[in-house]
Amino acid sequence: MITDPTGSPQSSQQPHWPDLATLNAVTGRLRTRPALVPFSETGRLRERLATAAAGKAFLLQGGHCAEMFGPDALRQVDGNVTVLRQMARIISYGSSLPAITVGRMAGQYAKPRSRPTEKRDGVELPAYRGDAVNGLGFTAPERTPDPRRMETAYDESAAVLDRIRALTARRGPSSGEGDGEFYVSHEALLLDYEGALVRTDSDTGRRYAGSGHMVWIGERTRQLNGAHVGFAAEVANPVAVKIGPEASADELVALIGLLDPNQEPGRLTFITRMGADRIHDALPTLVEKAAATGSPVLWVCDPMHGNTRIGDNGAKTRRLSDIEAEVRSFVEIHRALGTHPGGVHLELTGHYVTECVGGSEPVAVEDLGRRYESACDPRLNRSQALDLAYSVADLWGRGS
Ligand SMILES: O=C[C@H](O)[C@H](O)COP(=O)(O)O
Ligand SMILES: C=C(OP(=O)(O)O)C(=O)O
């Protein structure tokens, strides 16, 4: 696991809020706000994911690496929803499986970082940790964590959800089955925010993360005794855990015991992010040992996070060919083991950016500086995302 140099193992990757009085006031106000998503929708997503775990549906999860605040970001929602729905149709058609579409949207405002600070020209400042924590601008005031940003994150999430609902409202009998269904997810990283938005369903008495339909725990925060796993264990949402190449089978078995002790289909997803060059060594044992527990876990491939490289200009990039290779290996491994490859988890945008290399409208290494707009990690642009959707449709279609 990637260790965290900044926080205690109990609650790693948390900001050092300088103003605790404001923090308490903000979390107090957040506790009075309604959940952002209805419990009924969250429950329905769990049912949908159960079908994916059984090999009868496909999970398409994707969106920005880091969502940002403001009108530009809100305008980009349309492009992201459109590309995800286009991908879902391509994949569904090619694989003959219904696609469950889940945005990395309406809450993806907090980022784990490899290093607590960033240095430029001899100046060292706190690293950007997502708009819910601090600003991207490289100045001391911008980079100082500000708890009031968590309230903005709530308001921005609500605005994004409104826009998604407007875009996905059924338009009549010609709209395909499931077209009105679009779910949202994000990394449950910022415990002050997530904790303040837990709500109890008075009908069932179950506790839900009210910040989104599905939440995941990142590779850097999945410590078995950590606060993030503890948080996920307490809520009834579908939860996912990112699994990198250093994970041990014992850790996965322990995560199953902690997060899905009753082995309920649709509850737990493992999102594996191994890297194209490591997946063949790392994944098979993990899948075999987890499957041996009888767990109905849903296996999803994130082919982005294990394939990040640093380009000549110092910026992070990813090659579409590596991304496709990891997805191909993921499918081959699951097919060989008799388990189900359940879907993909992607960083993408519906807009034309030049952050990842390759594709049928190729982005070359020399193009990377042209439209590199991500606040954190490189995303597939619309054309690359559609290229990948065709490869995925072909891979899943061959096995059906
Ligand atoms: O999106 C994921 C992580 O936040 C990201 O990969 C960490 O990036 P860093 O290594 O630049 O901190
Ligand atoms: C940080 C992320 O991934 P990981 O935890 O797999 O590194 C992410 O998906 O934003």
Image (cartoon, grey):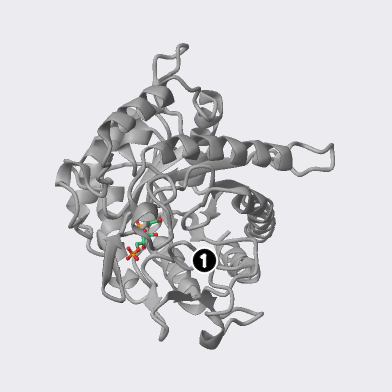
In this orientation, does residue 229 appear? Answer: yes
Residue 83 or residue 27, whichever sits in front: 27
Q: In the shown orientation, is residue 397 left or right of residue 15?
A: right
Mark 1 — residue?
379
Q: Is mark 1 on a helix, strand or loop?
A: loop
**Where does residue 273 sit, x and y in percent of width and height?**
36, 62
**Where does residue 139 sit, x and y in percent of width and height?**
37, 60
Displayed quadrant of residue 176: top right
Q: In which quarter of the image is ligand 2?
A: bottom left
Residue displayed at 39% across by 72% down: 307
In this orientation, does residue 198 appear? Answer: no
Residue 350 or residue 75, whichever sits in front: 75
Displayed quadrant of residue 397: bottom right
Location of the C terminus (image quadrant)? bottom right
**Where does residue 261 sit, x and y in percent of width and height?**
27, 32
In the rendered view, tell whether residue 230 sits above or below residue 334: above
Residue 17 or residue 321, whichever sits in front: 17
Q: In the shown orientation, is residue 56 left or right of residue 376?
A: right
Residue displayed at 45% across by 45% down: 186
In the picture as drawn, the residue positioned furthest to the top comes out as: 203
Residue 213 or residue 263, whichever sits in front: 213
Number of marks in picture: 1
Mark 1 residue type = Arg
Q: How crowded is mark 1: few (under 14 residues within 10 Å), some or many (20 or more)?
A: many
**Where does residue 78 sit, x and y in percent of width and height?**
69, 51
In the rendered view, tell whether residue 280 sits above or below residue 158: below
Mark 1 CB within 8 Å of ligand 1: no
Residue displayed at 31% across by 42% down: 294
In the rendered view, tell whether residue 352 sits above or below residue 163: below
Location of the N terminus (image quadrant)? bottom left
